[in-house]
Amino acid sequence: PIMKASGLSAGHVYFVSTPIGHLEDITIRAIRTLRTADVIACEDTRHTARLLHHLGVGKKRLVSHHEHNTHTAVPKLIALAQAGNTIAVVSDAGTPGISDPGMQLAAECAAR
């Protein structure tokens, strides 16, 4: 599923599920969201770059967002969304926000 966080005035933040095993276990909507995003926030940029290449998404601005930098990444991502950017948030596998830094970003989006 893709969860959309609104209320950030200009941009949007989408939480996009990624494959846990086979790289082709991803929805068409998730691929479209990744293709149209201005920025993709991810735990490991190398892992996400491989996924994007496999899906034919092309070059995207990747922002590192993991447990060790969430205190600086969340304000940066919120500022990008408020500036009108569309942000896609992914984890290395599965749905971001359960047991990874996506949870803090989702909470900040909800607070706004």
Image (spheres, rainbow, N blue to C red):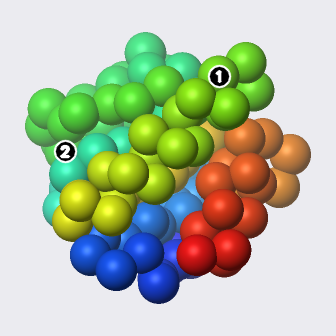
Looking at the picture, tell me which residue is in the foreground, 71 or 18: 71
Residue drawn where x is 59% and y is 68% of the image: 109
Quarter of image, res 112: bottom right
Please give left or right for residue 98 compared with residue 81 in the image: right
Residue 42 drawn above or below residue 107 = above
Residue 72 is at least partly visible in this image: yes
Residue 78: give x, y in percent of width and height.
46, 54
Is the N terminus in the top left, top right, bottom left or bottom right quadrant? bottom right
Would you say 92 lies left or right of 48 here?
right
Write down the residue under mark 1: 69
Residue drawn at x 54%, y 21% as measured from the top left: 44
Q: Residue 93's spot in the image, x, y percent? A: 66, 41
Q: Nearer the viewer, residue 91 or 13?
A: 13
Task: Check disc 2 and give the amino acid type.
Answer: Val
x then y, percent, for residue 52: 30, 37
- Callout in the foreground (2, 1): 1
For residue 95, which quarter of the picture? bottom right
What residue is rendered at 37% in x and 24% in y? 50
Q: First in sequence, mark 2 or 1: give its number.
A: 2
Does residue 24 show up? no
The kind of secondary structure element at disc 2 is loop
Q: CA distance from mark 2 to mark 1?
A: 26 Å
The one nearer the camera, 54 or 38, is: 38
Mark 2 near mark 1, Cβ–Cβ under 8 Å? Answer: no
Instruction: Count numbered badges in the picture.
Output: 2
Secondary element at tag 1: loop
Residue on which the image places disc 2: 57
